[in-house]
Image (tube, rainbow, N blue to C red):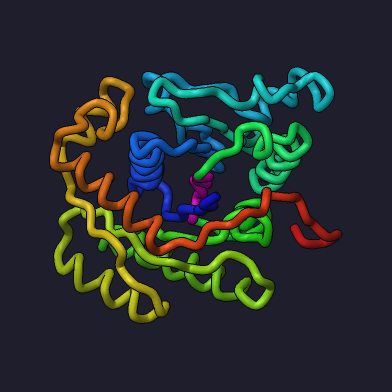
């Protein structure tokens, strides 16, 4: 099983890239589980015809832990990708990071990974902050590899540098390793050079450079991924190539994710 955490600044095209990666893996015949770790709970909408699925935290608020089943939490998208949204608290009422922890605990309690048996698990994680629950996928027993999505915009590069530093701070604990940067182009000035400099600074490689393409918006307008809606397009081929590159740069694991949180870690 490949366990991959994809981080990046909000609004950088992270969820779009993750969803197309998931669709690409599914087209390769793999069983894919995509877990959205953004409080907005919109990571998986393009697997579901533009429809949001109910988040785990919303389910727990209504049904409680005893009343929430795996079938409630996990939905199979129209492209075959298994979809989960962790969700978050209402704005101003709680910690989104702790919400992610609660969602992961609920998945583990239902033996989600053992029952779905995914070949690939993708964690789509908001990377503006890497603390508390947002660091959960980096922890030992969840993801083995971290990929950072960025553009050449200054704030995106700044966030990417912070994510890389956070991953580096965890490496001595046996947590996930930084396995590469994905450039999602915005066509800003000196974009490639800026991202190359970032990669050199944090000690990793730029594993892919995605074209800024109108095909992405066209697919999202109909609630789909490029890979599913326009499989013969140049952009779909880029995502398929990215999927193969990601697998080549990642280490698989036979272990199932297990919650391991010590008091005071969040």
User: In the image, is residue 38 part of the stretch drawn in magenta?
Assistant: no
Q: Nearer the viewer, residue 36 or 186?
A: 36
Picture coordinates of residue 58, whole percent (x, y)? 66, 25
Tell me the quarter of the image containing the C terminus.
bottom right
Total numbered circles: 0
Apparent side of residue 204 relative to residue 129 in the rendered image (left or right): left
The residue at 22%/39% (across/down) is: 236
The residue at 27%/60% (across/down) is: 208
Q: Nearer the viewer, residue 94 or 68?
A: 68
* Majority secondary structure of magenta residues: strand
Q: Nearer the viewer, residue 237 or 103?
A: 237
Picture coordinates of residue 180, whole percent (x, y)? 39, 66
Picture coordinates of residue 99, whole percent (x, y)? 69, 41
Q: Which residues are magenta?
A: 120-127
Picture coordinates of residue 169, whole percent (x, y)? 60, 75
Residue 148 lies in quadrant: bottom left
Q: Is residue 6 above or below residue 100?
A: below
């Amino acid at each position: 099983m490949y366990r991959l955490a994809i981080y990046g600044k909000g609004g950088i095209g992270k969820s779009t890239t993750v969803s197309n990666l998931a669709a690409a893996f599914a087209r390769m015949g793999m069983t894919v589980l995509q877990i959205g770790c953004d409080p907005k709970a919109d990571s998986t909408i393009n697997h579901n015809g533009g429809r949001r699925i109910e988040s785990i935290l919303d389910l727990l608020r209504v049904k409680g832990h005893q009343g929430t089943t795996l079938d409630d939490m996990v939905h199979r998208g129209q492209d075959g990708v298994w979809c989960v949204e962790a969700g978050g608290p209402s704005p101003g009422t709680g910690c989104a990071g702790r919400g992610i922890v609660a969602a992961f605990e609920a998945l583990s309690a239902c033996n989600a990974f053992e029952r779905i048996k995914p070949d690939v698990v993708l964690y789509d994680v908001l990377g503006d902050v890497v603390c508390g629950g947002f660091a959960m996928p980096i922890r030992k027993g969840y993801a083995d590899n971290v990929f950072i999505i960025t553009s050449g915009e200054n704030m995106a590069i700044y966030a990417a540098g912070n994510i890389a530093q956070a991953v580096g701070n965890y490496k001595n604990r046996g947590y996930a390793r930084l396995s590469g940067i994905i450039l999602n182009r915005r066509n800003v000035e000196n974009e490639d050079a800026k991202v190359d400099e970032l990669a050199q600074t944090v000690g990793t490689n730029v594993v892919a450079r995605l074209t800024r393409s109108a095909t992405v918006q066209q697919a999202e307008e109909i609630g789909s991924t490029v890979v599913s809606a326009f499989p013969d397009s140049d952009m779909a081929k880029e995502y398929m190539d990215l999927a193969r590159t990601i697998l080549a740069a990642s280490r698989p694991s036979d272990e199932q994710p297990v919650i391991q949180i010590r008091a005071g870690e969040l």
